[in-house]
Image: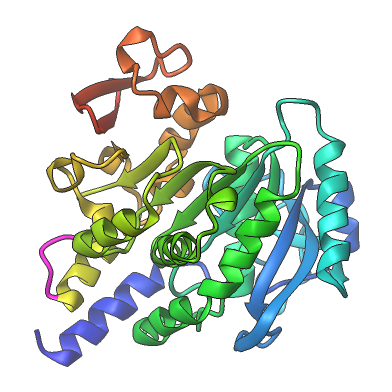
Amino acid sequence: MPARILVSLLLLLAACAPRGEITIAPEAARLGHVERIYIATNRTPAGSRQEGVSFGRVDVSVPPERRPGTITYPRQGAAPDPQRDFLVSDYARFARPEDFQAELRRAIAARPPGDRDVVLFVHGYNNTFAEGLYRFAQIERDLRLPGVPLHFSWPSRGQPLAYAADRDSVLYSRDGLARSIEIAAQAGGGRAILVAHSMGALLLMESLRQMAIAGERRTLDRIGAVVLLSPDIDVGVFRTQVRAIGRLPQPFVIFTSGRDRALNLSALISAEPVRLGSLTDAGPVADLPVMLVDVGAFSTGDGHFNVATSPALLRILSQAQELNSVFSSDVGGGVGPLTRAALHAERAAQIVISPAF
């Protein structure tokens, strides 16, 4: 494919993504729904790479006047509007990892028994700090996720033409994410639930592989679930990662879509027929202990983040108690809250979610 056409496609896909920056507005806490997100990051405030991991927490005000799945930033030149804009109402930095761990433990202890997991989210390619943070806050709000949210922000350039640079940053960030997973797993009270999107899924798998090779089985065994959303990973690479990791955390869920234009473009760039997140047939991974959930019927925009952006799919998933019904292999035993969806078990490792008309 000519380079000019490839660049045009990248820019077209990037145009669908919201761009924004952090806006601090303490008054937003009185009007919006505040989601407290804990932060681990190896990116500087300017977005470049830094050595080591910094820690903090951010209170994100999610505006009451919005459609599920949407993120709205303040209009350029206009005053922030807590009724419609995602804003930061408060934040704090922790000088030492020990201080952060103590704060995380207090947050976990304040939750009722049975709701003391840490949900660690890893964003994808072409994400600024604000976009990754606000997307996680939006998912938290729309899906009512259980547990304490922890966001790992790696130094994506936040530029559509920086795909190769972002892949290098993924490799650069493996140690930082491994350290963050260790902190989440050792925080006490529950398990570490790991969720990663797009290229962030590659970072997560590489970090888990690295931890397994280093013999950190105790930490790996504290992981209660792994969820990969539209993972931008070569299928063969994924299989080698799984072999290196050994015993996978369970459940291990992969949300896929054959209508994912971003992953189809990634496959084109990589000269491969398909990426892990665009599988429509579980065959290539059928021998692995993973569950594929095909959500292609709910594609919105470029179809690359249906779990977060499709109001219909969000409504279905939010009705599932802690998403257990979606992830359960016993889909024939009554899905309860998933009455508006048709779940079809095609193979032992695959579920297709489609709208019920």
271 or 78: which is nearer to us? 271
Q: Is residue 280 above or below residue 81?
A: above
At which x and y percent is residue 74?
Answer: 68, 68
Colour setup of the view: rainbow
Q: Position of residue 334 (x, y in %)?
A: 38, 8
**Which residue sits furthest front?**
215
For the N terminus, which image quadrant?
bottom left
Q: Is residue 161 above or below residue 276?
A: below
Q: Residue at x 36, y 50 (%)?
A: 246
Residue 97 can be seen in this image? yes
Judge whether residue 274 is colored magenta: yes
> 61 or 333: which is nearer to us?
333
Which of the 4 image quadrants contains residue 102? Answer: bottom right
Residue 247 magenta-highlighted: no
Tell me: 124 left or right of 5: right
Report how many numbered discs are placed on residues in the image.
0
Residue 91 position within the rendered picture, expressed as x and y whole percent measured from the top left = 85, 65
Q: In the image, what residue occupies the spot 83% across and 62% down? A: 100
194 relative to 84 in the view: left or right: left
Q: Main secondary structure of the magenta part?
A: loop
Q: Nearer the viewer, residue 168 or 60?
A: 168
Residue at point 40%, 24% (across, down): 328
Q: Nearer the viewer, residue 199 or 235?
A: 235
Q: Quadrant of the C terminus?
A: top left
Q: Is residue 275 visible?
A: no
Q: Residue at (50%, 82%) from the top-left corner?
A: 172
- From what the image shows, is residue 9 above or below residue 264? below
Side of 45 relative to 289 (left or right): right
Q: Which residues are magenta?
A: 271-275
